[in-house]
Every structure is written in C-alpha cells, then in structure tokens.
Amino acid sequence: MFFKDILGHTEIKDQLTQSVKDGHVGHALMFLGPEGSGALPMAIAFSGYIFCENPTDEDRCGVCTSCVQMNAWSHPDLHFSFPVVKQKKSETADKHAKNFLGLLKEDPYMTLKSWELAMGEEKKKSIISAEESQEIIRSLSLKSFKGGHKIMIVWRADKMNISAANKLLKTLEEPTQKTIVILVAVSPEDFLPTIVSRTQKVNCGKLKDSDIAHGLENQYQIDPISAKKYAHISDGNFYLARMLATHKEQPTDYLDIFTRWMRACVTSKMPDMLAVCEKIGTYTKDQQQYFLEYCLQFLHQSIVYVHLGEGAARFDDEALDFARKFAPYMEKADIEGFEKIFSDGHYMVERNINPQLLFLKMSQDMMKLFKAKS
Ligand SMILES: [Zn+2]
C-alpha cells in the first residue's frame, strides 16, 4: 500500500509526509473517517512511509528493504490489532491475523461488516477486549526488529470496550521509545474523552464523488457514466460504490426491482409481490446481499430527502423520479423497523434460507410497517 494507491485525500497525504520530514510524528494518532473512506489504507501507507529508508517527497521508495517487506505485507515492526468475535475469553486478534491480512490485501477499503462476514460471525458483534489491549501492550514492549520505529495500527479502535480502553491509556500517554500507535476509527465520539485527548487527530473525512468515480474507472474499468452514477449513490463510501459497480451482472436493474417491490408492499398487491420475490429468487446469494445493501442505501437517502430536501439526497435521475413518489411514505416511517428487516434479511441470505420465502416474509413485514404508518 502506497500513498499513490489511496483515492483522494491529497491534503492529508501532504500533511502526513510533511510530519515525517519535519520529524513531528506523534506517538499516538487517531485516523478518523467513515466506512469506505480509506482511513485504514492511509494508516498503512503512512507506516510504510515512516519505515522507508529512502522516501521521496510524496511516497515511499518501493525498493528499500523496508519497502520490500511492506510490499509483501510482512514488515516485522508493523503490527495490527482489530475487533474479533471471541470463542474463548483468552482469545486475541492474533488467531485471526492470517484471515485479516488476506482480506486486507484483497480489499483495503473493507468494512467492519465485511470483516465479520469473513470471520463467519455476522450475527455476533466483534470487539476489542481487555485481553487484546494486553496483547497490544505486550507487542509494543518488545524491541523493534529493525532498530527503527514500531507501529501498531488498531483498526476500528472504537470497538474497544471500556476495560480495553482503560488498559491502553497509559501506553498512549507514556509510550515506549520509537513507538507509534495509530487508532483507526469512524468517529471520536465513540471513545472515552481521556483517549481522545491523548491522541493527535488525522481527519480523512468522506471521499469526494470525483475520487470514487476515478477509482472505479481506473481500478475496476467501469465506464465513466456508470462510475459517476455509483460514486454519487455511494455517498463517499468506496467499498459500497465498488460493490455496486462490480456486481452489475444483474438480470435486472436493482432500481427497477426495488421500485416494484416497494410499490407492491405499499399497495399490498400480492401478485406483484410474488412476482418480485420470484425474480429475486433467481439472484445468486451475492446478488441478493448486494441488492439488500442497495435497498438500505436507498432507504437512508430517502430519509435525507424527507428531512433535508431533494438537493441533499444522493439519487441519480432515474432513482430521483421514484424517490419523489416514495418520500411521502417515508415521512413518519419506522426507520429502525425497516433497517431491522433489511439487516435480518442480510443475515438470513448468509444462512442460505430459501430466497423466495425469505423475501416474501420481508415483504409482509414491510407491508405492516407501511400500514401502521397510514
Ligand atoms: Zn523504501
């Protein structure tokens, strides 16, 4: 992972490389950014830049011993910690390291959900426990292999429980020499104030639509018009944009099916509903899950539409047409109820439940929500 591999965030890259050149790298950093924004790849590229023996102004050299180790994802002084679903109390992230690195190499923009799925643990919440904090402290107390810096990237550090966070406080305050801890998280609000105050913030923020479109075109050969469309819908989340754009070998457009599905639920027209469920039944398991992600995103944007107006919502022209008609139904809708239907659906798809039956059950649940509202 090089800085050049990371979409957008030019000012952040400049700020980070400058801090290394000036010798002003903090020992406790917090990289913030919403899911799919690239805070994790940024932390990795930054670590590589710090390790590099011969960096340029903009990036690591790629050929020194440290860079060769970074290229192979095997730098001995770069450590990762991350949330896991534990089978045993004593278990730490170490047990899942191979799986984690495998997913990371494939997809540096991975989300917590995609990681939980990779662990086969979508239903249980993953956490960073006190035992994991202890492990972080232990690995940072060891001497660095190469005599330079030791860096610990704690991905989704916001998933630390209170005792884990308390254990880590001292390390953040009085780190051992040449030690850098990078906490990667979505928002500082998820931390104890004592943790937030001990770290230097690097705010990656949402990705711009143009950066996402650029990434889709260059890395995934998506045509410019579609790239723009997916960038817009995904609202700064490259993971989602890529997922929608690269799984487009759909027999039918998601929007078309979603529109027909919602119409059938609002009007309680059983034959239409059955037709939609039959159509979804022909999707592969992956396609069903991407479709549900799409539905959830549409729902969220509909809420934006209702509360902040048409200009604030992220719909393309085709979707906007339906969003206008759909908005009145979302005005006082039970959002949590809808979210639960979609996320439970996601889980059931993972468990190979018959899709036609599953989507029919979801339709009935949604019908109830629409009825309750009217
Ligand atoms: Zn190098």
Image (cartoon, grey):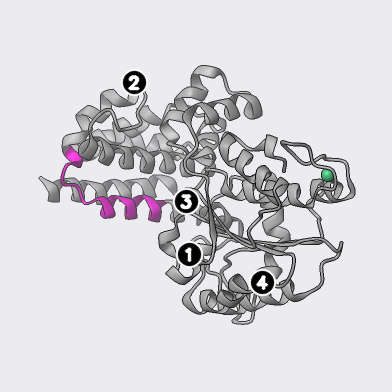
**Mark closer to the chain start, 2 or 3:** 2
Q: x, y percentage for residue 369? A: 20, 50
**Residue span colored magenta:** 329-345
Q: Give the CA separation, mark 2 to mark 1.
A: 41 Å
Secondary structure of the residue carrying numbered label 4: loop
Q: Residue at x 29, y 45 (%)?
A: 363
Looking at the image, is 152 positioned above or below residue 284?
A: below
Report crowding for label 2: few under 14, some 14 to 19, many 20 or more residues within 10 A (C-alpha): few
Q: Quadrant of ligand 1?
A: top right
Direction from residue 141 to residue 156 in the image, left or right: left
Looking at the image, is 309 positioned above or below residue 32?
A: above
Residue under label 2, please give it. 317
Residue under label 4, please give it. 175
Report crowding for label 1: few under 14, some 14 to 19, many 20 or more residues within 10 A (C-alpha): some
Assign the magenta stretch its main secondary structure: helix
Q: Is residue 33 magenta?
A: no
Q: Give the CA separation, mark 4 to mark 1.
A: 16 Å
Q: Nearer the viewer, residue 206 or 212?
A: 206
- Closer to the eye: label 1 or 3: 1
